[in-house]
């Protein structure tokens, strides 16, 4: 599931974008806003894959806003410009926008843009941003072994042995991590690339770089079956 954000005040454009992306079943709306600070916070914290942004004047300078995102150590979203004319199309190209749509929007144009976007190659090394007040902590997903629930907080266990606590529930992260992170228990999400042992009889698995055994529950038996099937192996 990919996340997207809308930066626009036009209700008809917002409604049509939401409608067309909801039909795909592959996108989740983070929200819509015309507040610069809120947009910045949503992008840094949630790292959307796609941002629709009105470049005609919702912000004083929409292109400067996108440039400022380079100051933060986060993967940048793909930007799709919304405008009533083509005057800013060249500037959008210079700022590496993914697409440029003319308003009022047409369903077919949104669908064509989304179809192209979904064919983009996936890049590795996505970052997780943990926010606490004005403090931002960035974690490379390639360095995460597992996530463990601890009441209303979540502990990230890292390859280097660090344990980093986020003041959010485990469910918050369940659908926001790359596909190789799977929930196997009410208290655990694991990095499946670290799995080196599965005991279906005892309902446990073992991960590289982590000394304790991880339980998996019957509720997630199908997930463990899929993990087992996906692992490259030669059986003796």
Image (spheres, rainbow, N blue to C red):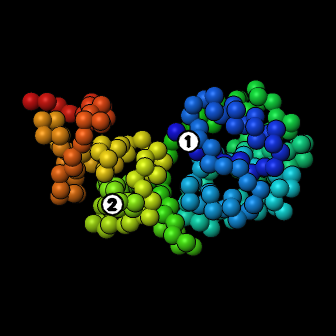
What distance separates the C-alpha of mark 2 from that of mark 1? 27 Å
Q: Nearer the viewer, residue 114 or 216?
A: 216
Does 7 appear above or below 1?
below
Rendering coords of residue 182 (x, y %): 35, 43
Could you tell me if residue 187 is visible in this image? yes
Image side of residue 178 versus residue 43, left or right: left
Rendering coords of residue 31 (x, y %): 66, 49
Q: Secondary structure at mark 2?
A: strand
Q: Nearer the viewer, residue 152 or 173?
A: 152
Q: Quadrant of residue 114?
A: top right
Q: Residues within 10 Å of mark 1 (few under 14, many from 20)?
A: some
Residue plotted at (42% across, 41% down)? 179
Question: For the image shown, how many numbered marks are present on the structure?
Answer: 2
Q: Secondary structure at mark 1?
A: strand
Does 101 appear above or below 24?
below
User: Which residue corresponds to mark 2?
Assistant: 150
User: Which residue corresponds to mark 1?
Assistant: 2
């Amino acid at each position: 599931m990919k996340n997207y954000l809308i930066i626009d005040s036009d209700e008809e454009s917002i409604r049509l974008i939401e409608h067309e992306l909801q039909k795909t079943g592959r996108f989740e709306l983070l929200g819509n806003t015309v507040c610069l600070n809120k947009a910045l916070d949503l992008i840094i914290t949630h790292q959307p894959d796609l941002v629709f942004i009105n470049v005609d004047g919702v912000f004083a300078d929409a292109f400067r806003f996108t440039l400022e995102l380079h100051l933060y150590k986060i993967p940048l979203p793909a930007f799709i410009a919304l405008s009533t004319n083509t005057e800013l199309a060249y500037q959008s190209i210079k700022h590496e926008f993914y697409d440029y749509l003319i308003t009022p929007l047409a369903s077919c144009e949104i669908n064509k843009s989304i179809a192209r976007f979904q064919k983009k190659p996936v890049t590795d090394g996505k970052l997780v941003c943990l926010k606490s007040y004005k403090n931002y902590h960035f974690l490379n997903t390639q360095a995460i072994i597992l996530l463990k629930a601890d009441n209303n907080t979540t502990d990230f266990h890292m390859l280097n042995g660090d344990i980093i606590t986020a003041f959010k529930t485990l469910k918050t992260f369940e659908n926001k991590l790359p596909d190789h992170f799977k929930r196997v228990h009410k208290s655990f999400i694991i990095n499946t690339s670290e799995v080196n042992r599965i005991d279906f009889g005892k309902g446990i698995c073992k991960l590289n770089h982590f000394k304790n055994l991880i339980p998996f529950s019957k509720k997630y038996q199908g997930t463990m079956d899929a993990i087992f099937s996906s692992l490259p192996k030669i059986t003796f």
